[in-house]
Image (cartoon, rainbow, N blue to C red):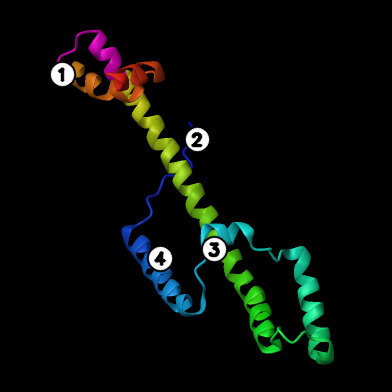
Amino acid sequence: MDNRHAKTVPQNAIDQVKSHLTEAKKLLEPYCPTLTVEQRRSLPKMSDGTLAFGEKSLQHATNHPEFLPAHISLDEWKIDMADVTNLKQLMALLSDLDQLVGDTRLAAGNEAYFAGRGYYHNVQRAAADGIQGAKPIYDDLKTHFRSKATRAGSADK
């Protein structure tokens, strides 16, 4: 098996990252709205494809405010466009961090599960061969590998 994850992430590094992320969240919170699930789902989204439209229309509105509808504030529109642009940079960094953490966790989890399965199979063989002390370990671990049918049957009782 190819060991992709051979060095542990030091607790000090994890603590520092958590501290920095907590600080970043505190810095942003006063400026960020909280949306409901329904709002996140239903609000029209500005994507990379519509960003150019937003920038161009704001530029025209700034140069020709006579066409601006009365219910639209040019100052608030400028704030919104600035945040769309500036927060995109943060989203890219957060996406990279999410991928880095996710990949590391996936690799570590895969290797830990593989090691656990290897241990389990050795204990299973030892229990089958009657080696003292193996059966209680096997009995404890085998509950994690019961079939779905067995689990469903025991849940009905």
Residue 94 sits above or below residue 143 on the image: below
Residue under label 4: 17
Q: Position of residue 98 (x, y in %)?
A: 52, 56
Q: Is residue 63 left or right of residue 13?
A: right
Mark 1 near mark 2, Cβ–Cβ under 8 Å? no
- What number is the disc on residue 50? none
Characterize the local packing of mark 4: few (<14), some (14-19) or many (20 or more) Cα atoms within 10 angstroms.
few
Q: Disc 4 to disc 2, how far (Cα)?
A: 28 Å
How far separated are the C-alphas under marks 3 and 1?
Answer: 48 Å
Compared with 98, 63 (above or below) is below
The residue stretch that appears in magenta = 122-133
Q: Amino acid at mark 1?
A: Gly
Disc 2 element: loop
Residue 135 shown in magenta? no
Residue 11's quadrant in the figure?
bottom left
Q: Badge 2 local density, few (<14 within 10 Å), some, or many (20+)?
A: few
Q: Which residue is label 1 attached to? A: 133
Mark 3 / mark 2, whichever is N-terminal: 2
The mark nearer the N terminus, 4 or 2, is 2
